[in-house]
Image (tube, helix red, strand yellow):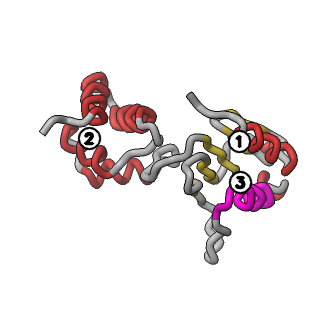
Amino acid sequence: MEPSEEQLFADEVIASHRGQPGALLGILERVQEHHPHKYLSAGILEYIALKTDIPLARIYSVVTFYALFNLEPQGEHSICICRGTACHTRGSRNLLQRLRLELGLPEESEDGADKLCATTADRRYSLRTVACFGQCALAPVVEVDHAIYGHMNEQILHRELEHLRGSRRA
């Protein structure tokens, strides 16, 4: 069976990291970034485990520990809302609720969990939350396509969403 394009890319990345301490993080990050939907499939994780001789359980523990890794396909655009104390007290919950409504994503779960990662059905947008960006003086903080915005309010967030709706990634 011929290796897939994703596996061939993984082979190159693994070879470029061979012998480096902490190589697993770099390998996973590059392989995820290479995927058009910015995620790590179960198949590619198994392949990386096989090729690096790292137990699959260890790879899954790394992928589930670090928030930057995705196990589900992500949207074309990403929006991340800080749920830290400073951001929460300055309205991040309202920003999150507004965005969920505008994107047609379900309401928060009954258990009140603050961690969210949801993608719209059309895979245009992924909305996630983080515990803290470490930018408390700028609260509330929102990241839109890897750009950080401080002192965010609902009007600015709506404007940013409208800007995304008018754009397409190449």
Please state if 108 lies on the left or on the right of 119 as rendered. right
Residue 131 sits inside the magenta stretch: no
Circle nearer the N terminus (3, 1): 3
Where the N terminus falls, by quadrant? top left
Which residue is label 2 attached to?
Answer: 48
Residue 156: x and y in percent read: 84, 43
Q: Residue at x 61, y 41 (%)?
A: 77
Which residue is label 1 attached to?
Answer: 165
Which residue is label 3 attached to?
Answer: 84
For mark 3, give the secondary structure.
loop
Q: Nearer the viewer, mark 3 or mark 1?
A: 1
For mark 2, give the secondary structure.
helix
The magenta stretch spans which residues? 92-105
Identity, as a three-letter code, of the amino acid under mark 3: Gly
Q: Residue at x 55, y 49 (%)?
A: 123
Q: Residues within 10 Å of mark 1 (few under 14, many from 20)?
A: few
For mark 1, give the secondary structure.
helix
Circle nearer the N terminus (2, 1): 2
